[in-house]
Image (cartoon, rainbow, N blue to C red):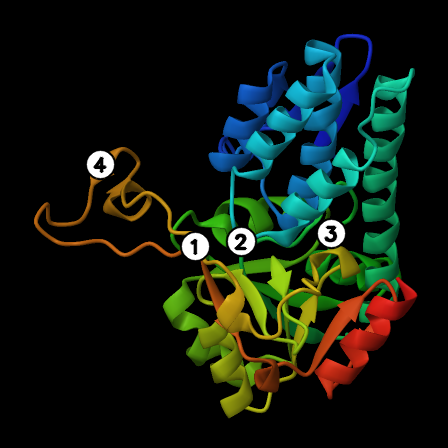
């Protein structure tokens, strides 16, 4: 990758992140030095993507440990960071891992730093393995449709869904990627198009309501995930479910790419996944200008849930999970 998404500087006790709200106009980095700044960066989506949120949460607890010293206060800070966004399971998963390392024994900071670095390395390794397994699905001269951003910008590695694309590209395969713009924050238009073209991938950005027009000539749909239930129901950026329905109508394979850390083994179906509702101004305004009538109401759910029956497979670092999902996901849980 020709950029990085996150780094922790132990000497300065600061987290350096690529500010994704400024892309593609400016490639700038933010320095997070307080627990509040880490919380704000996650909540306001200066960094985003389920795996990357988990990595940031891990380093956020490390930062808190250096600042606060007292384990009770560090736990309070960790819980606060964990409340920044509700849908991505990786956030709570990472916070839980970090809290298990909290005690009053000497060397607390170093233990937490080791665990946070482990979370980051696991993410990078998972991305590479997801790419390896998923690349087999991409045929030469294929047309691939993606939604939102599930690339290097969403992880500390090469990405999940886009990691599959990068892996196929390195194998010499030629293809075109259709990047849906992804309302309301245009993460496909702003982020995926920037990331893919920066790394030499032929990309065509389309509006979300053009998906049905381009689907008949599409060979594969690849998306990421923020939380996956034990029956295979998957939460991803709003619009994913509609894409899956269209893909099923045109008999286009629809695959989800996500690490095992994105599975929520405590819930049975997608009905139990909490859906984040975001500020109405993300839709009401564009470039700081109001584009919706003032009296009109705004609904702004950030995610929707795609039923497992519409998903052909889930690409993980352990391999590609196929239906029946309930049995196969339970098997993944046993060996993780």
* Closer to the eye: label 1 or 3: 1
Looking at the picture, tell me which residue is in the foreground, 137 or 255: 255
Q: Which residue is mark 2?
A: 87
- Ranked by sequence position, the earlier of labels 1 and 4 is 4
Residue 155 appears in the picture as rendered: no
Number of other residues with Cα within 10 Å of mark 1, as a class: few under 14, some 14 to 19, many 20 or more:
some
Q: Quadrant of the C terminus?
A: bottom right
- Ranked by sequence position, the earlier of labels 1 and 3 is 3
Q: Which residue is mark 3?
A: 159
Q: Which residue is mark 1?
A: 302
How far apart are labels 1 and 4 at the CA level?
21 Å
User: Residue 289: which numbered mark, if any?
Assistant: 4
Which percent across, then down, holds residue 310?
Answer: 58, 84
- The answer to whether mark 2 and mark 1 are in CB contact below 8 A is yes
How far apart are labels 4 and 3 at the CA level?
33 Å
* Closer to the eye: label 1 or 4: 1
* Residue at 77% in and 35% down: 98
Outermost residue toward the top in this view: 12
* Residue at 75% in and 35% down: 99
How far apart are labels 2 and 4 at the CA level?
29 Å
Which percent across, then down, holds residue 250?
Answer: 53, 90
* Residue at 89% in and 29% down: 114
In the picture provided, is 208 more to the left or to the right than 219? left
């Amino acid at each position: 990758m020709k950029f990085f998404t996150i780094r922790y500087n132990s000497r300065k006790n600061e987290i350096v992140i690529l500010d994704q709200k400024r892309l593609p106009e400016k490639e700038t980095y933010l320095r997070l030095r307080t627990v509040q700044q880490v919380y704000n960066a996650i909540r306001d989506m200066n960094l985003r993507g389920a795996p990357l949120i988990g990595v940031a949460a891990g380093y956020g607890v490390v930062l808190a440990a250096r600042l606060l010293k007292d384990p009770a206060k560090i736990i309070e800070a960790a819980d606060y960071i964990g409340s920044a966004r509700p849908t991505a399971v990786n956030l709570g998963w990472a916070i839980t891992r970090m809290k298990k390392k909290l005690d009053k024994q000497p060397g607390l900071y170093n233990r937490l730093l080791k665990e946070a670095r482990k979370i980051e390395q696991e993410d990078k390794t998972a991305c590479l393995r997801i790419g390896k397994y998923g690349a087999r699905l991409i045929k030469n001269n294929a047309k691939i449709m993606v939604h939102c951003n599930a690339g290097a910008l969403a992880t500390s590695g090469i990405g999940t869904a886009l990691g599959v694309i990068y892996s196929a590209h390195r194998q010499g395969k030629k293809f075109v990627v259709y990047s849906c713009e992804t309302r309301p924050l245009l993460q496909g238009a702003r982020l995926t198009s920037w990331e893919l073209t920066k790394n030499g991938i032929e990309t065509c950005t389309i509006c979300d309501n053009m998906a049905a027009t381009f689907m008949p000539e599409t060979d594969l749909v690849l998306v990421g995930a923020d939380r996956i239930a034990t029956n295979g129901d998957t939460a991803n950026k709003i619009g994913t479910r509609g894409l899956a329905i269209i893909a099923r109508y045109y008999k286009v394979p629809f695959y989800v790419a996500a690490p095992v850390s994105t599975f929520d083994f405590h819930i049975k179906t997608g009905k139990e996944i909490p859906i984040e509702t975001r500020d109405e101004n993300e839709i009401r305004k564009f470039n700081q200008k109001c584009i919706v009538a003032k009296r009109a109401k705004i609904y702004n759910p950030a995610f929707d849930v795609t039923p497992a029956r519409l998903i052909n497979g889930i690409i993980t670092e352990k391999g590609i999970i196929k239906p029946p999902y309930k049995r196969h996901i339970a098997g993944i849980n046993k060996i993780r």
